Image (cartoon, rainbow, N blue to C red):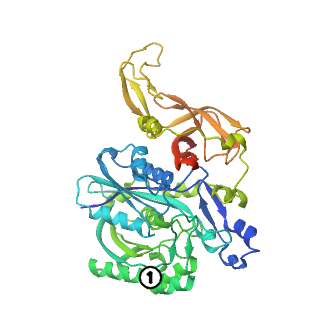
Amino acid sequence: MKGITAYGVSLPYYRIRRETIFEAMGWFNPGLAALKSGEKTVANHDEDSLTLAVDAGKSCLSNADSAGIQGLFLASTTMPYRERSNAGIALAALNLSPDCRTLELGGELKSGVTALVSALRDQGNGSILVCASDCRTGKAGGTNEILFGDGAAAFTVGDDHVIASFEGASALSCDFADYRRVNGDSFVRSWEERWIRVEGFNRFIPQALDGLLKQAGIGMAELAKVVFPPLGPRDHVAMGRQLGLKSEQIQDPLIEAVGHTGTAHPLIMLAAALEESRPGDYIAVVGYGGGSDALLLRATEAVVDLKTKGGFQRCLKYRQELDSYTKYLSFKKMVEKEAGIRGEEIAVTSLSLTWREQDAVIRLAGGRCRACGTPQFPRERICINPRCGEVDMMDRYVFSDKTGHLFTYTADHLTYSEDPPSLYGIVDFEGGGRYWFDLTDCRLESLKVGQPVQMTFRRKYRDEARSLYGYFWKATPFKS
């Protein structure tokens, strides 16, 4: 029996109320008043679709055997690189084997569901990790700006300890140009909203779902939950009525709390549905954009004991309001600020050195002495333990999945930061090892010596002159 074996979700720490956006841009577009309720997720200045995908994958693999992963499927319309292996970077950051197959899907919003279906239908041996992530940007004062949110979801697919079995899938693919971007575009463009709704959304989703149910030989009433992404709050309710669903069958579209997260959205909704599911429940998942792909899952007895139960809710609750619209614009790279000479200087990135040091930089792997068991980062030839000092006795030791505790920290108001002040801390890892890291997704007043922290993969800088992004690991408080 093949199916989903684990899942993970990543939602940014920052949220912005739609009321805040309306107060800033309502003078330009009074029609936004109809959409100003709720809030949406906003990627931090050091986050992008790749880091969110890694975070979701890391959460997913905490409940799966990463050694058994034989493939990584990555879906997004907003990955940082158009020509470089984003999946290769994610593979390394997740400490997966280079023997894994990688596949990147994009260009259409249904590609998150498409990637999951492709993994479920894959005939290869071993498990596959599927990650879907997006950070789409809408122009200021537009509907897209107020509705788009940022987020990621990840699922492992295999045949051991299945929590939701794969029962079938259907596909509908076409060139329906509702949302689009071309090379060089920073913002998503769309056609007339009513046309998108009537000719696309209201036609494709029912057609894909009808094909799925006919293939499975079950009726709409037998579905415990139906997951489909929203165009907006009202459209989602209307679609439920069109499909003849009862209110309890319709999965919360998450528009009020998260926004529309692109390729990741139906998979984030699926994660939320799994947390509420019971053994035997049928769950239909429908993706929209470039047509519509659908799949049918059935919860097993194992769903009751899933360790990540509540994982989506923890992500939802760990939040900080972004109460400044201009700060939001800054995070979205929609305003150019005076960075000063310190902020403008970026050291040349040596790609050959980055390749040689990727075990430390991307995988956060150090060493552990075979003689005395002392871990250390970075990895050196000589053991750091003064009572040992053995030479060339280091085994590889990964720190990215280890819990740390904040030994000390400082706030720097002088150096350039997108979210001042810059916060740094020395982290002591449980089991041994110490290093200093940037701190992120926290406020100075929330930090305490000794508090537990976890590692998170983040963007360190962008070298625009050379079309490069620098990534490393930062420390962030645990989501409680």
Q: Position of residue 29 (x, y in %)?
A: 71, 76
User: Can you identify the residue that label 1 sits on?
Assistant: 245
Residue 75, by quadrant, is bottom left
Q: Position of residue 299 (x, y in %)?
A: 34, 65
For this orientation, the residue located farthest to the right is: 27
Q: From this viewpoint, which residue is outermost toward the front?
A: 465
In the image, residue 119 above or below residue 216: above
Q: Which quadrant holds residue 413?
A: top right
Q: Is residue 58 visible?
A: yes
Q: Residues within 10 Å of mark 1 (few under 14, many from 20)?
A: some
Residue 327 image offset from top left, x and y in percent:
70, 56
Query: Is residue 399 visible from the viewing direction of this image?
Result: no
Identified at 61% across, 54% down, the residue is 319
Quadrant location of the N terminus in the rendered image: bottom left
Looking at this view, name the residue that lies furthest to the top: 387
Instruction: In the rendered view, tell whether residue 438 sits above or below residue 122.
Output: above
| Count of numbered circles in the view | 1
Q: Is residue 231 above or below residue 76?
A: below
Q: Amino acid at mark 1?
A: Leu
Is 38 in front, or is 365? Answer: 365
**Label 1 secondary element:** loop
Q: Nearer the viewer, residue 426 or 145?
A: 145
| Residue 51 percent coordinates (x, y) | 50, 51
Compare residues 316 and 401 and report the one nearer the observer.
401
Question: Image height check: is 247 above or below 466?
Answer: below
Q: What residue lies at 48% left-to-right and 78% top-to-bottom?
A: 177
- Residue at 31 percent across and 49 percent down: it is 100
Left or right: residue 21 compared with residue 259: right
The answer to whether residue 31 is left or right of residue 114 is: right
Q: Is residue 326 left or right of residue 381?
A: right
